[in-house]
Amino acid sequence: MKQEQTKHRPKRYGMVIDLDKCTGCGSCMVACMAENNVPFKKDESDKLLSITWMRVYKITNGKSFPDSDICYIPRPCQHCAGQHEGHSPCVSVCPATATDYSRETGIVSQIYTRCFGCRYCMAACPYHARYFNWWDPVWPDGMEKYLNPDVSPRMRGVVEKCSFCFHRYQAAKDKAYLEGRRVVEEDEYQTACTQACPAGAIVFGDLNNPDHLVHKLVKPDLKNGGRPRNPEVFRLLERLGTNPKVYYKSSRQWVRKAGDNYLPGEKPGAVIQKSHS
Amino acid sequence: MKVDRRSFLSLLIGGAAGTALSPLPWKLTDDLSIWTQNWPWTPVPQRGESYYETTTCTLCPGGCGVKVRKIDERCVKIEGADEHPVNKGGVCILGLSGLQLLYGPTRIKTPLKRVGEKGEGKWRSISWQEALDELASRLKQVRSKGTPEKAACLLDGIDGTVGRLFQRLMTVYGSPNLFCMPAAEDASKAALKLAGGSAVRAGFDLEEADFVLSFGCGLLDGWGSPVRVFKANSSWKDGHTTVVQVEPRLSNTAAKADHWLAVKPGSEAELALAMANVIIGRNLYDSEFISNYCDNFEGLKRLVALHTPETAAAATGLGPETIVKWAVEFARASRPVALYGRGQGRASAGSLRDCMAIMLLNALVGGFNRSGGMWIVPEYDYIAWQEPELDEVARAGLERPRADGSGGGKDGLTLSLVQRLLGTDAEQLPEVLMVARCNPVYSLAGSGGVEDNFRKIPFVVSFSSFMDETAAMADLVLPEHLYLETLEDVPVSAGLNFPLIGLCRPVTEPQFNTMALGEIVIRLAGIMGGTVAGAFQWDDYETCLKETLENKWETLEEQGFWYDSGFRPPAWDQAFGDAGGKFRLAGGKIDEILEAEEITPAGDPAQFPLVLVPYDSIRLANGYIGDPPFMIKSVWDDVLEGKDVCIQINPATARKYAVAEGKVVHLVTPVGKARVKVHLDEAVMPGIVCIPRGLGHTAYDAYLAGKGINVNALIGSMEEAASGFDAAWGIRAKLA
Amino acid sequence: MDSALIPEGVKRCPTWKFLLALAIAGAVLLWGVVAMLMVWFKGLNQTNMNDYYGFALWIWADLAFIALGGGAFFTGLLRYIFGIKELKNIINYAVLIGFICYSSALLILAIDIGQPLRGWFIFWHANVHSMLTEVAFCLSCYFAVLCIEYLPLVLENRQLDRVPFFHNLSHNMHETMAVFAATGAFLSFFHQGSLGGVSGVLFGRPFSFRTGINVWPWTFFLFTWSAAAYGPCFTLSITWLTEKISGKKLVKDNVVELLAKIAGWMIITYVVAKIIDTVYWATVTAPSLGFKWTFFYSNNPLYGKWILLTEIVICGIIPGLLLISGPTRRNPTTRIIALLLGVLGVSINRWVMVLQVMAVPVMSFDKWVLYYPSWQEVATTLLPVAYGVIMILISYRYLPIFPQEAELNPVDSVSASDGVELEDGQQDEKEAQTDGQAVPAEA
Ligand SMILES: Nc1nc2c(c(=O)[nH]1)N[C@H]1C(S)=C(S)[C@@H](COP(=O)(O)OP(=O)(O)OC[C@H]3O[C@@H](n4cnc5c(=O)[nH]c(N)nc54)[C@H](O)[C@@H]3O)O[C@H]1N2
Ligand SMILES: Nc1nc2c(c(=O)[nH]1)N[C@H]1C(S)=C(S)[C@@H](COP(=O)(O)OP(=O)(O)OC[C@H]3O[C@@H](n4cnc5c(=O)[nH]c(N)nc54)[C@H](O)[C@@H]3O)O[C@H]1N2
Ligand code: SF4
Ligand code: SF4
Ligand code: SF4
Ligand code: SF4
Ligand code: SF4
């Protein structure tokens, strides 16, 4: 009965990252690099030239010692749905349809072999989630042995980004089909970063599925662009109307406030997202 | 002529139009674009059968269970093993990068013999037979002079079979000079020993604690078994455990703690003793435990009477009321635990005074062997080999004093006073030094002096799998397998409150001409002959391992680890096992230790107004294993900028010494000088300069070498008089 | 030497001077070509662009060239559709400049993309929702139109014109030019607009995002309007520069003044629209996204309120007023100042809409990021400039670009034959004669 229900409902895969638990350890970053054949160079200290599908930002409360505080914000692609489903900032601008919004899963894909490297999508993404292959990817002799065959290494001159480990979804789906099932269970499709996080700070699943933990944590207001109803949960740049599927949870008010921009005197939470088209 | 010109033009135009309309240009365009999608220099990973193999990660003492995803014979990904009691599916950033070590350019591919000057990097590849013969003959030479103590051995630890094989080798050979790299665990074992326990170690029931008082432990920076502690931290968040971090810098741990007590570095013991003072003064201690299972409470009272919140306030920089408040909260919690071990707890043992004082806090609240507290766990005893038969030379050698002047593990407190063997002030250097699984040339304080000493040691043997700084200074390199290629037992301590032996097993064929370290020892002994060979009767290491672990082997093979799931710590009356079984709170050596002055960093404050405090970061492997490319990639841009490391200083400090964000300055300490960049950070106490450990490698590969500075080269060792531990946690410094 | 190619009734500088000028421009061109090849073969790592600056100097140059080339479509519109006859005396040059600007823009795009060999995917896998798709289609179509507009001019070269087919072709093309001009104006309206749309639709970038009509943000209309307003300023500035360099009057004052006056009114109306847009954005759009407009002009070393002031007042209101007021328009000095300010103004606008957009932090914990171009970027940006200079040198020398030139500069054979130039001139003329005889004999 329940299977019947979930079968027809389109999935909206999303994430909740608990910023109280996230320790900034970087496991998610490296799990992602290892899973997705992300290349590396000899000098990666310039973060404007460093491909990290998952990047952990460090934010501070701006206060001086000893009242200073730090919080880490892991930032994969937010898989924005946009104001009307599919109108993601990046997808809407790509001239060659090299990045696409899946209505089946809500995942924003990137097709490396079609991308011709105009970088318009990068200009469009306010989260800096998109990375350009400025160089040919080079693995030192022998190291190409560890490359994952499920994810094709990218060539120079194209844009890449977090795919919510889509190949894992495909594998899970194939497995389900092979076993005669129509439903991919919550634990069958988990992203590499979620799996690796030693703090268990990342939760991944179908936001549309009330049985999934992400749904329970976010309590998304589906009629209202998926805005979280849990007051401790927020999204980055909610006010821009990007409608992301990555949510953050924090018990600290200053952290929640850092998720968006506010005019002096505005109170987070009191501001309703403006809709525009 | 007429026709020519016109027809030429027609041909040109017609030809152009014709070509444009033909399929040729479109086909070519299409082909070219397809070519860009299949550039031959962009690798295409081979497909194949996908499956997992499990093993144990040994890249740090954490002991996590990992599974390696394989495609045919290739290892493509390391993930955490879900059913493993230590990491429960999690895996740290280093563990995840393991394949970059396995397949990386920094591996040593075959035994090497030095041909150039020491450290020059000129090598000749030799066969294993040649290599083992060479080492054996060197060892025999030293022994034939009747000075077997002149051969020394430096390891990361001696808990497992491989460490024990080395220990056995040194014993039958006749040298007391077996050393281990220092770690905070040495101090806690020593403290337990002084308190009356023997063959025990400290474990912490972290998950169950409801109040964690951490004295600078980098709980989220790689302390203990890192993944386990991360998981515990998350359970604290869910369960509302209070975490208080005592530290001069807002580390990851401090940032995630509920309360950060920013104290002056080096004042931890003062704070702990003052807290003890408060707890005793307000009768908040566990009187049942104290009166029935502890010795000399009166002595302790006398000791702590001198350490009031007021005196500690001056030392720590905290207000007396803050000290009182947290002492009271700690004592009133139902399952409090106080933790010792700066940073990752692996850079040095630290001071025994700190460790003692913090352990006393656990004692006062009756926190031993109790849910959420500090457990006294017996040391592993599964290696029960027959005592080896010793010849005359060996017996005589073993009677001679150790190079560190201590009794070693027998009657001294520790095997880890390495600074006396190799440090700047080392007096007697060995003639042959064997180094395995550690990188003293890089890791020891005053590493510049250590390197000089390595030049003076006539024969250095490295068993490293990587061309690290120590291997680079060696005369002979006998590369061992990497953990993913080898079979070995991994007894885990690292603060674990239960016994667990992991099994490291080969998930891939050895990539290069390397050998299992245990196998190297057994073969070496065989070549040595005599009583030495006699002590190693196993056919090979695998046999040795299986025999040793006989009754656990099946479990180990089956699930990849063995552990006592029902392990409960002994009740208070048996906590120490031996006669009396009481916890000694004061008296004798304990008094001597606690009454000592706090360790102050070297240097004249007038000349060096600042204090340099290194810190550990989970994103920087700082021991024998260097940061693999993925990890270096994750290092923050306010830590590493190009080749420069950034020092963290408070903006107030910067104003005082007129340096600005991004400025390149020289950081000068009494022992060294280095170029650094300034990064202003409110997270650091004024007057303090922070630098991460783990940078400034000169060896390994182009992805790691030459980035930043090695902070160990800026710091000298500082011995704690009563224990001999190198307790230097920093050094005075200035910016120039 | 090449006098046979030189239009009749006009005088050109000696060949050596021409060749020297070509050589200088050619050297810059070559430098640019080297840089271009480096970028193509080694990749975009040759630039200083990065993941924050996906769009940088080149996209600015692209947008600026296209805006400046806007003189072509707008003058064409005035000449052929609105039938302003006087403008026929400058339309050729406007078309040439437009042609140069647009071919440069296309070249820059081919250098700018990471996978030049896949550039055609923009047509093949076109996403109709993307402003860049619209740009690509309209830009290529309009470039084709410009080619068609430029071709008859080429065919009017003295030698080519002797081929009857070419002669008739160019004649017939002139006849139908109104159709192309109309098409061009229509296409330009869209691609200038969609270039404005490129940044205007970025709803993730509050600095450039604009509300608008239907799918078109206000910047869509502002870009078209500004190109129409400032494009002629560029045409006139280049005409002025050509006159200065050649030392001749090439276009009559009444023509220049007429176009300048139209440009003036266009600028004024544009600036009014721009001010309204800015005020609406600053008081409604940006605040609704959580930003105070001053945020975009503070806490960084470069972008202050001065840039807004320069763009709108100094390079907008002032040149507009100078050009609509008779005395300042007629005064050559104030006129050229106004024209140059206009050129600067639209360039600043395009800069702001490309580079400042990238510089502004959006996430509250992001930082301002500034960028400076690498020499390869500078060289490849100068490449089209050199190419344009060469195109103008050649076109001016061999094509009857300025219909009024002969009338304004009657060639006096006596005065033309003294000094050192004489020998060259004579020699040229001799060659021209032999050559000139040969051709009719053949035809
Ligand atoms: N052994 C075997 N080989 C075959 C075939 C076979 O049946 N068996 N079939 C052949 C046929 S018919 C075909 S079409 C080819 C297919 O060959 P490939 O095109 O190589 O097919 P895939 O492996 O399905 O997918 C390619 C890559 O796309 C990634 N990917 C998945 N989703 C997305 C996305 O949304 N965006 C982006 N950018 N990447 C994504 C996947 O992770 C994978 O790395 O294989 C051929 N080769
Ligand atoms: N889950 C999942 N589904 C997929 C894909 C995926 O990656 N995952 N990939 C998609 C893609 S790219 C493709 S091309 C399709 C392919 O889907 P199919 O076209 O269904 O491909 P095959 O599975 O190769 O099956 C073809 C059948 O043809 C038979 N056959 C082989 N040779 C001959 C012959 O000479 N004559 C005849 N009559 N039969 C022959 C084979 O035995 C087999 O039964 O699958 C699509 N569906
Ligand atoms: S792995 Fe988890 S804890 Fe570590 S940085 Fe990522 S989200 Fe945070
Ligand atoms: S985060 Fe950026 S790349 Fe990802 S969907 Fe949103 S706009 Fe696109
Ligand atoms: S860079 Fe690639 S994915 Fe991005 S907009 Fe251009 S073609 Fe599309
Ligand atoms: S979901 Fe997958 S692709 Fe995205 S950041 Fe996590 S590991 Fe990387
Ligand atoms: S914590 Fe230590 S043992 Fe565990 S995965 Fe990381 S490096 Fe390996």
Image (cartoon, coloured by chain):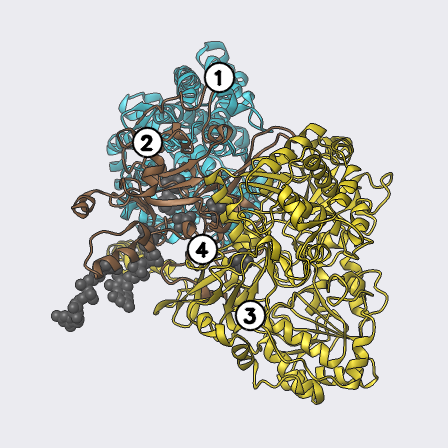
| Quadrant field for ligand 2 | bottom left
Q: Amino acid at mark 3?
A: Leu
Circle 4 crowding by C-alpha within 10 Å: few under 14, some 14–19, many from 20: some
Q: Residue B400 at what x, y percent from top left?
A: 83, 74
What chain letter is assigned to the residue under label 1? A
User: Which badge, 3 or 4, is on the more N-terminal residue?
Assistant: 4
- Please name the residue that numbered disc 4 is placed on: B88
Q: Foreground: A181 or C225?
A: A181
Mark in the foreground, 2 or 4: 4
Q: Which chain is brown?
A: A
- Please name the residue that numbered disc 1 is placed on: A265
Q: Is residue B505 visible?
A: yes
The image quadrant where one finds the N terminus of chain B is bottom left
Q: Do discs 3 and 4 share a chain?
A: yes
Q: Which chain is yellow?
A: B
- Please name the residue that numbered disc 2 is placed on: C188
Q: Amino acid at mark 4?
A: Lys
Mark in the foreground, 1 or 4: 4
What chain letter is assigned to the residue under label 2? C
Element under disc 1: loop
Q: Amino acid at mark 1?
A: Gly
What chain letter is assigned to the residue under label 4? B
